[in-house]
Amino acid sequence: MDERRNGQSSLPRHPDNGHYEPSPTGLGKSWLACALGHKACRDDRSVLYKRVPRLFANLALARGDGRYARLQRTLARVQLLILDD
């Protein structure tokens, strides 16, 4: 999906500094991401759901034991990568 429309990002921005502001818990962000993932699966697209802390830990371990390039190729092949906090 393209997150830009007319040069504007669809992510919420802080009015003072323009930086991305995370939304509060309980709003359904993870649920929505999973729903989009399910739809992508039904449309025969490859989907991978990863929690960011675990992904970073896996990347650090992979760098140490020589699997880093293979892990990067795996992530690059996926059509929809869902990263959840």
Image: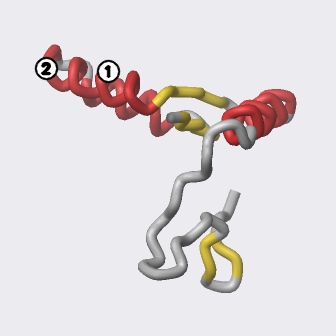
Q: Position of residue 43 (x, y in %)?
A: 84, 35
| Mark 2 vs 1, N-terminal side | 1
Residue that appears at 46% across and 39% down: 76
Residue that appears at 29% across and 23% down: 57
Image quarter (top left, top right, bottom left or bottom right) of the N terminus: bottom right
Secondary structure state at the residue bearing disc 2 = helix
Indicate the quadrant where residue 29 lies: top right
Numbered marks: total: 2
Q: Considering depth in this image, is 43 or 35 the residue closer to the camera?
A: 35
Residue that appears at 70% across and 37% down: 26
Residue that appears at 86% across and 29% down: 42
Indicate the quadrant where residue 44 lies: top right
Rendered position, 82 above or below 58: below
Q: Position of residue 38 (x, y in %)?
A: 80, 29
Q: Which residue is mark 1?
A: 58
Q: Considering depth in this image, is 30 or 58 the residue closer to the camera?
A: 30
Label 2 environment density (alpha carbons within 10 Å; few <14, some 14–19, many ≥20): few
Amino acid type assigned to the residue bearing label 1 in the image: Asn
Secondary structure state at the residue bearing disc 1 = helix
On residue 64, which mark appears? 2
Q: Considering depth in this image, is 29 or 56 the residue closer to the camera?
A: 29
